[in-house]
Amino acid sequence: MPQEGLEKVETAGFILKPDSPEIRPTYEKVRASFQKRGIHVLLAERSAEMIGEEGVPFERMCAESDFLVSLGGDGTLLSLVRRSYRWHKPVVGINAGNLGFLADVTLDEVEVFLDQLFAGECRIDQRLMLGGYIRKTTGAKVEFFALNDIVVSSPIPSKMVIVNASIEGERFNTYRGDGLIVSTPTGSTAYNLAAGGPVVYPLTRAFILTPVLAHSLTNQRPLVVPADFTVDLDTEKYEAMLTVDGQERYAIEEGDSIHVGVAKKGALLLHRKERNYFAVLRDKLHWGDREWLS
């Protein structure tokens, strides 16, 4: 269930959209709004170097901040949530472009958002995250976390992969096609939706397995799995790649296995209290675009 407000609103840690030095004037304007209200702003080192300013190490920023801010788009927020996972700090996304599903505070709304933050009129949603690891044939273990999804696919475009899937240790399907998506409810409106998977309310305690362009005469359907289940995947015959939130990539060799479940802690996303998920869906997906709804 969502919780309301923050215990402290003294220090905010910022990261900026990468490879975008032109974002500096926008950041300076947003920072001034925060500082005007007495909020100390810490800027992560990598973002600071990009715009020619002094910053602090990412780890220090996370440890010393009461909440974290991504200034960019949904991709910037996804990266911040994953990288800051072990500090478990609330994250808010200020969108420097078009309204996103995750980074939903626009630049014009920053002042109002801060007023609401101090008035305790914001809420913190705990979003389910995937947690898992790749077990290499060498015995090495590579851990990962995902807020949106993980995708097993071929590193070569349009080449088939074969993915064997087990739930709770019981083999249940072999997917032959362009890949397999394991998505959280938050990520259900991303690649999962494009591949024909269901839209799932973001606070639902479940995750989704969706095949991508299955090369099969049988009807391969998306599957919604309860949050307390685990899924094991392995590939055969063809080269494969594991992509986490569309940003991190790992080579998967035959004999490697992938273990996926729900992470022990969810992501804490800070939103305006009046934000309505179904209104965002209607706006972003153009649902109900009929004259009788206008």
Image (cartoon, grey):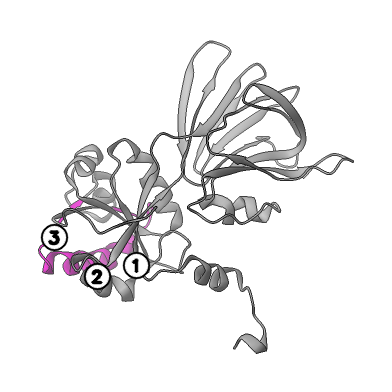
As helix, strand or loop, the secondary structure at mark 1 comes to loop
Query: What secondary structure is found at the residue carrying circle 3?
Result: loop
- Disc ID at residue 39: 3
Task: Find the magenta span and give its range.
Answer: 15-42
Q: Is residue 1 left or right of residue 262?
A: left
Residue underneath mark 2: 116
Q: Position of residue 214 (x, y in %)?
A: 79, 42
**Residue at 28% from the left image edge and 67% from the top image edge:** 26
Residue depth check, mark 1 versus mark 3: number of the one nearer the observer: 1
Q: CA distance from mark 1 to mark 2?
A: 8 Å
The answer to whether residue 133 is left or right of residue 158 is left
Return the mark for residue 115: none
Task: Please name the residue shown 72% across and 24% down the image.
Answer: 171
Residue 204, percent from left and from top: 52, 50
Query: What count of labels does the image hold?
Result: 3
Near-viewer residue (101 or 128): 128
Question: What label does residue 273 carry, if any?
Answer: 1
- Name the residue nearer the viewer: 95 or 198: 198
Tell me where residue 103 sits by quadrant: bottom left
| Label 1 crowd (10 A; few <14 / some 14-19 / many >=20) | some
Instruction: Tell me, yes or no, whether the highlighted magenta stretch contains residue 175.
Output: no
Amino acid found under the numbered disc labelled 1: Lys
The amino acid beneath tag 2 is Gln
* Circle 1/circle 2 CB separation < 8 Å: yes
Q: CA distance from mark 1 to mark 3?
A: 20 Å
Which-is-in-front pick, marks 2 and 3?
2
**Residue 205 x/y as whole percent:** 51, 45
